[in-house]
């Protein structure tokens, strides 16, 4: 982010044209960023600037119970959704995130993580498991890594409404050369 975050965010907001297109902007935050008061203030500024566009915070690390309760209260009071990114891989196993599920709005399953680790055969089973978890906790479920029509068809067969991946578009560049916007459906 530039030295003047609000100027950068103004440029980003203008380029996204969210008021006209009703896009959803998702920002990934790690634990350190989620605890940074300047970062949180900048996110609230962005939300107000993009209103009525939707904003979602994707947590990239598994928070403790106290942390997720605090994040949930903070972001929800500003009408910002909260998501757990990359469930089923890394530290975001069911046992590690189970306590957080009542406090978030969505979970995201990244099937590309299984492809890259040579475990593609696990995708259908893991996908069904996480879809069922999302349903039982009344969460939105987003499938990441949709690369072609076959992936999209598999998602539809599994009853998954929300998909994200290169099949829908590659990240677009903004003026300062950062890749910030990813295609999704």
Image (spheres, rainbow, N blue to C red):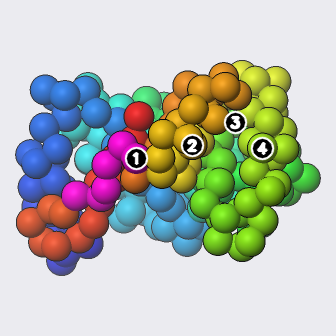
Residue at position x 62%, y 54% in the image:
110
Q: Is residue 72 above or below residue 96?
A: above
Disc assigned to residue 103:
3
**C-alpha span from label 3 to label 2:** 29 Å
Q: How many marks?
A: 4
Residue at position x 13%, y 38% in the image:
17
Residue furthest toward the bottom? 3
Say which element carries label 3: helix
Label pair 2/1, CB-CB below 8 angstroms: yes
Badge 2, how many Cα within 10 Å: few under 14, some, many 20+?
some
- In this orientation, which residue lies closer to the viewer: 71 or 159? 159
Camera-nearest label, 3 or 2: 2
Which badge, 1 or 4, is on the more N-terminal residue? 4
Disc assigned to residue 124:
4
What residue is pinned by disc 2?
Answer: 151
Which badge, 2 or 1, is on the more N-terminal residue? 2
Name the spot of residue 21 as percent of width and height, x first. 19, 28
Position of residue 116 in the picture relative to residue 172 (left or right): right
Camera-nearest label, 3 or 1: 1
**C-alpha span from label 4 to label 3:** 26 Å
Residue furthest toward the front? 150
**C-alpha span from label 2 to label 1:** 9 Å
Label pair 3/1, CB-CB below 8 angstroms: no
């Amino acid at each position: 982010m530039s030295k003047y975050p609000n100027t950068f965010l103004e440029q980003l907001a203008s380029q996204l044209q969210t008021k006209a297109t009703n896009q959803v902007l998702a920002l990934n935050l790690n634990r350190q960023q989620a605890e940074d008061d300047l970062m949180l203030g900048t996110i609230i500024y962005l939300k107000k600037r993009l209103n009525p566009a939707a904003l979602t915070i994707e947590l990239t690390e598994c928070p403790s119970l106290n942390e997720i309760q605090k994040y949930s209260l903070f972001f929800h009071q500003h009408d910002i959704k909260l998501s757990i990114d990359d469930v089923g891989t890394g530290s975001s196993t069911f046992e590690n995130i189970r306590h957080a599920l009542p406090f978030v709005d969505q979970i995201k399953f990244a099937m590309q993580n299984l492809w890259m680790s040579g475990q593609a055969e696990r995708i259908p089973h893991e996908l069904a498991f996480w879809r069922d978890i999302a349903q039982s906790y009344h969460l939105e479920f987003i499938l990441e890594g949709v690369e072609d029509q076959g992936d999209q068809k598999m998602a539809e067969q599994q009853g998954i409404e929300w998909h994200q991946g290169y099949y829908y578009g590659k990240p677009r560049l903004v003026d300062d050369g950062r890749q910030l916007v990813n295609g999704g459906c």
